[in-house]
Structure formats: C-alpha cells, structure tokens
Image (spheres, rainbow, N blue to C red):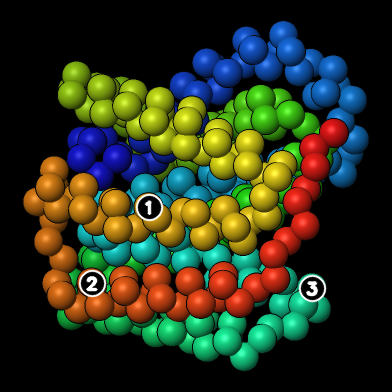
Amino acid sequence: MAAAAAPAFAIAFWRNAAASVLIAPVALTRSRDELTSLGRWHWMATALAGVALAGHFATWVSALKLTSVAAATALVCAQIVWVVLYDRLRGVRLAPAVILGLAVAIAGVLVVTGVDFALSRRALAGDALAVVGGFFAAVYLISGQSVRTRLSTTAYTVTCYGICAVLLAVLCLATGTELTGFSTRTWLLIGAVTVSAQLFGHSLLNHLLAVMSPIVISLLLLLEVPVAALLAGVFLGQSPAWGVYAGLVMILIGLAVVTSQRPPPAPVQAD
C-alpha cells in the first residue's frame, strides 16, 4: 500500500470492494440462511464492525502515505491498548504489571511521535492517523467477536467488507478521490494487497474471532511490526531515525507485558 501510486482512500476502497465481489458468490450460495435469520442486535454489531473497518482503513492507509511503514505499523498495532481499556470500562481490574506495560507502550508511542515531530509535521500527522486506525481496529475486533457466535466466517466477512466498501466509496466521492487511471504497476500492487492482506489476512482474523479473543489476536498482530519494518527497509529504502526504533522496541515490550499478565480467555465457540 505504501508503494502503490494511488490515493489512500482509493486503495482502501478497492481492496474491500474486490474482496466483497470475490466472496459474494460463495456467501450467497452457502450462507444465505445465516444472513436472512440474523437478528437486529447482531445486524447492528455487524454494521458497527463494518463502519469501524472503514475507519481503520481510511486512517491507516493514509498514515502509510505520510509516515514510515515501521512507525505506522507499530502505532496501529497498539490497538491492544484500546482493547485493554475497553475491558477496564467493563469493570475488569488491571494488574499493576498491566498498568506498567501500558505506561511503557504509551511512552514508546510518545518517543516515536516525538522523533517524527522533530523530523516533520507530515510524519507526525501520519502517526496520529495510525493511532486512530488502531482504535478503529480494536472496535472492529471487539464488535466482530460477538457476531461470530452467529455467523460463519464467509457470511461475516462478506457483510463487513461490503459495508466497509460502500462507506469508503461514499468517502471517495465526497473527497473527490480518483478511483481509476492508475498505472499497471499500481493496479498489480492493489491486487496483491487484496489477495494477501484482505482475502487471506483480514479474513483469517475474522475466522480466528470464533476461537480467540481480540486480545490474543492483537498479540499475534504484533509480529507484523518487525516484519513490516524489515520489508520497508529492503523494498522501499525506508530507514527511520534510531529514535523511532527505540520507540518501537518500547511499544513491543510494553504490549508484551500487558498481554502476558492477562489471564487466558475462555474460547468462543461459533454455532
């Protein structure tokens, strides 16, 4: 996405729209009864997940265009902080080690954003968008978990992607974002993102929601941080300042402490 010469909103739209079109025939054939029998509450939760997914892509893909891949990925993967805060609002008590881990992670965020602020306000804006993208990702996972108890992966995925694509299309029209006229290379990159990150990546997360909690999935996503930074360095020539790497290490350490101190969640079984 960072390498594609297309607007962020356009990339976000096409990866969701294309995935929806590819999955729809299977969903309409195998999951029609599930969708028609879904109750009002579950439809609302699914709609919330779709809205959150649109917010996530709109902000995070934009972040990738403004700041380094390493910083954007680390900050968006800090979604685990939002998940923990959600648990706290529900009355779940936080152990001292969890509070310490959160403090270290937030300090790492401040280090990354502070370094980027010293470099450019453009990078700082990208950092802020990545943090917001992490918030939307947390809402997406939390709301989706409750729906996955009623819907299969295929039915839930096509519904979320469809809602997300419609909202992103409206956003593109409202902002005058061009959706066509890209080079062949850019279309190939968008296609690669759709297959690898959307059909396999996000669809896999949707599948895991039936058997794992959002906190565990958020932990797995932390592996994306060092891999993304390495790939960006090799293929995009991105070499963030050392202060950014120091902040990334602090974020990973803090989030690892948070996760390791939480009790293992009971698995969620899908119907």
Q: Is residue 26 above or below residue 60?
A: above
- Disc 2 versus disc 3: nearer the observer: 2
Q: Nearer the viewer, residue 63 or 252?
A: 252
Question: Badge 1, how many Cα within 10 Å: few under 14, some, many 20+?
Answer: some
Q: Say left or right for 136 vs 159.
A: left
Residue holding disc 1: 224
| Mark 1 residue element | helix
Looking at the rendering, which quadrant does residue 130 occupy? bottom left
Q: Secondary structure at mark 3?
A: loop
Quadrant holding the N terminus = top left
State the mark number for residue 245: 2
Amino acid type at mark 1: Glu
Say what secondary structure mark 2 lies in.
helix
Report how far apart the C-alphas of labels 2 and 3 lie in the structure.
34 Å
Instruction: Please name the residue shown 75% across and 39% down the image.
Output: 148
The amino acid type, in three-letter code, at marker 2 is Tyr
**Measured from the top left, where is residue 182 in percent x and y?**
23, 24
- Using the image, determine if residue 33 lies above or below residue 38: above
- The image quadrant of residue 119 is bottom left
Q: Position of residue 269 (x, y in %)?
A: 80, 42
Q: Position of residue 31 (x, y in %)?
A: 76, 18
Residue that badge 3 annotates: 90
